[in-house]
C-alpha cells in the first residue's frame, strides 16, 4: 500500500493510535527510544502505590534518599534540573552497592552563580543525557521504594514539572522530608537548613550542592533522627506520617 504523501504528522499519529494504541503512535511522533522511556515513566506512576508501605517498620523500610541540582528555583518559569543524585537505604543503614548520579542537559544556559555553587558547567551539561533519559534512569533506580529528601518541596516541584512535561504524569511515590522530621523533633529550632542540622548532629559536611553528596549527608541525618524516633514509640511509616501531619 502506498503511503499518503499528504497526511500530516498528527494525522499519521491518530491513524496509528486507532490501529495499535498509544505506543506505536508515540513512537511515530517521538521516536521509539523516547516513546519507550515515556511508557516506562507512565507505568511506574500508575503502579507506584498498589502495594501499601504504611505498615512497614521503619527499621525495615527501604528508601531512596535523593537530591536535585537545578538552574534556579522556578520549575514552571524556565528553570531545569541539571543533576540527580540518590542513595539507597534500609532502616538505618546504607545499601552500599546502590547509588545513583546523573547529569542532565537542561537545554539552556546554566547561570554562572549556579556553576560556582554546583561545579556543573555548560560544557559538562551539553554532553549529558536529556531530561527524559535522566527521569527514566532515576525511576529505574528508585523502583517502588519510598523517596526521602531534605526540604522536599523544591525537589517535588521540579520532578512534577518534569514528569508532566515529558510524560503527562506527576510524582506518585511516597515522600518523607527530613526537614519536616526536624521540625517535629525540634519545634523551637530557628534554622532547619541542611548545613545547620549537619553541624548540630555531628555529621561531616563532605561538600554541599553536589546531588550525590547531599543525598549521602541527608541519609546520615535521617539515621540520626531515626534513633530519636525509636524512643518516641514511632515504629512504622504510617506512624511517622501521622506524627508529621500534626506539625
Image (cartoon, rainbow, N blue to C red):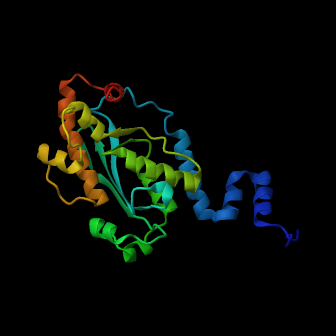
Against 235, residue 12 (above or below) is below
Query: Where is the N terminus found, in terms of image quarters?
Result: bottom right
Query: Where is the C terminus found, in terms of image quarters?
Result: top left
Whether residue 173 is visible, yes or no, is: yes
Q: Residue at x 11, y 46 (%)?
A: 202
Total marks placed: 0
Whether residue 127 is visible, yes or no, is: no
Q: In the picture provided, is 163 more to the left or to the right than 148?
A: right
The x and y percentages for residue 92 are 23, 39
Outermost residue on the left side: it is 202
Q: Nearer the viewer, residue 148 or 236?
A: 148
Q: In the picture provided, is 171 more to the left or to the right than 192?
A: right
**Quadrant housing residue 221:** top left
The x and y percentages for residue 152 are 36, 45
Outermost residue on the bottom side: it is 123
The x and y percentages for residue 186 are 19, 33
Q: In the picture provided, is 36 more to the left or to the right than 80?
A: right
Against 28, residue 222 (above or below) is above
Outermost residue on the right side: it is 1
Q: Residue at x 49, y 49 (%)?
A: 160
**Quadrant housing residue 115:** bottom left
The x and y percentages for residue 55 are 37, 26
Against 103, residue 214 (above or below) is above
Amino acid at each position: 500500500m502506498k503511503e499518503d504523501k499528504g497526511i500530516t504528522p498528527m494525522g499519521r499519529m491518530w491513524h496509528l493510535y486507532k490501529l495499535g494504541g498509544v505506543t506505536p503512535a508515540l513512537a511515530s511522533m517521538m521516536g521509539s527510544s523516547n516513546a519507550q522511556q515515556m511508557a516506562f515513566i507512565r507505568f511506574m506512576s500508575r503502579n507506584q502505590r498498589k502495594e501499601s508501605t504504611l505498615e512497614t517498620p521503619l527499621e525495615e523500610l527501604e528508601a531512596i534518599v535523593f537530591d536535585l541540582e537545578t538552574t534556579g528555583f522556578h520549575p514552571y518559569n524556565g528553570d531545569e534540573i541539571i543533576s540527580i543524585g540518590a542513595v539507597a537505604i534500609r532502616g538505618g543503614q546504607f545499601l552500599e552497592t546502590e547509588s545513583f548520579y546523573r547529569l542532565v542537559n537542561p537545554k539552556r544556559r546554566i547561570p554562572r552563580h549556579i556553576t560556582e555553587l554546583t561545579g556543573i558547567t555548560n560544557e559538562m551539561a551539553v554532553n549529558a543525557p536529556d531530561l527524559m533519559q535522566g527521569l527514566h534512569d532515576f525511576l529505574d533506580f528508585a523502583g517502588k521504594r519510598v523517596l526521602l529528601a531534605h526540604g522536599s518541596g523544591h525537589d517535588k516541584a521540579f520532578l512534577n514539572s518534569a514528569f508532566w512535561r515529558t510524560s503527562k504524569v506527576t510524582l506518585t511515590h511516597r515522600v518523607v522530608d527530613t526537614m519536616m522530621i526536624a521540625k517535629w523533633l525540634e519545634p523551637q529550632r530557628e534554622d532547619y537548613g541542611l548545613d545547620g542540622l549537619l553541624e548540630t548532629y555531628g555529621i561531616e559536611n563532605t561538600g554541599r550542592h553536589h546531588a550525590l553528596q547531599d543525598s549521602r549527608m541527608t541519609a546520615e541525618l535521617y539515621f540520626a533522627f531515626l534513633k530519636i524516633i525509636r524512643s518516641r514509640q514511632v515504629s512504622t511509616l504510617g506512624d511517622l506520617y501521622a506524627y508529621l501531619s500534626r506539625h
